[in-house]
Amino acid sequence: MFEDMCRERQIRRVLRKLARQRVALILQPGNVWVIEKALAIDDETDAHLKTCYMRGWVEQIDHAIPTGKLSPKGALPQGDIFTDTTPMYRLTDSGWFVINRSHQFTLLTGFLALLTLIATVG
């Protein structure tokens, strides 16, 4: 049970990291997006993103976006810039609700309203 809670926490952490990504600039020619705070996609992160996709928290924008990494000094690498392809995701409304915990807040306010009604009538 503790492992399940830790895994759920990691899934939500990946969702929050996805929400923090932003386009820093667009390189021309080629219309190449440079993403700040991009997710480091490994097997575990990919599994978490697919879990979010399955739950309807994210949706795929594009299937095979060419990706690459900067050098340790932050410069463009020598040779081929793109070394891999990865899907690009965006958050859905449900994903934003999970991040902001809006569903729990709505349930709590509804429950408090019901208790207030019962106290008022009784």
Image (spheres, helix red, strand yellow):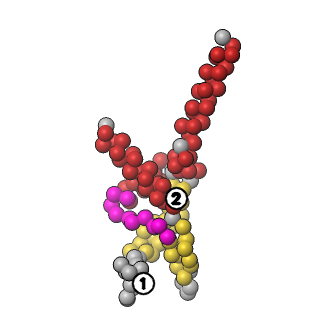
| Other-residue count near label 2 (Cα within 10 Å), few / some / many at <14 / 14–19 / ≥20 | some
| Other-residue count near label 1 (Cα within 10 Å), few / some / many at <14 / 14–19 / ≥20 | few
| Residue in the picture at 59% in, 50% down | 93
Q: Nearer the viewer, residue 51 or 69?
A: 69
| Residue in the picture at 37% in, 55% down | 47
Main secondary structure of the magenta stretch: loop
Q: Position of residue 94 (x, y in %)?
A: 55, 48
Q: Position of residue 95 (x, y in %)?
A: 53, 50
Q: Three-letter amino acid code at disc 1?
A: Leu
| Residue in the picture at 43% in, 53% down | 13
In the displayed structure, 102 sits above or below 38; it is: above
Magenta residues, as a range? 36-45
| Residue in the picture at 59% in, 27% down | 111
Q: Is residue 38 magenta?
A: yes
Q: Which residue is mark 1?
A: 76
Task: Place residue 113 in its image quadrant.
Answer: top right
Provide the secondary structure element on which disc 1 rests: loop
Q: How far, Cα to Cα, is label 1 from label 2?
A: 25 Å
In the displayed structure, 78 sits above or below 62; it is: below
Q: Three-letter amino acid code at disc 2?
A: Ala
Q: Is residue 95 magenta?
A: no
In the displayed structure, 57 sits above or below 75; it is: above
Task: Place residue 25 in its image quadrant.
Answer: bottom right
Give me the disc on residue 15.
none
Q: Which residue is mark 2?
A: 19
- How many marks the image carries: the answer is 2
Q: Position of residue 76 (x, y in %)?
A: 42, 84
Question: Is residue 116 found left or right of 12 in the rendered image?
Answer: right
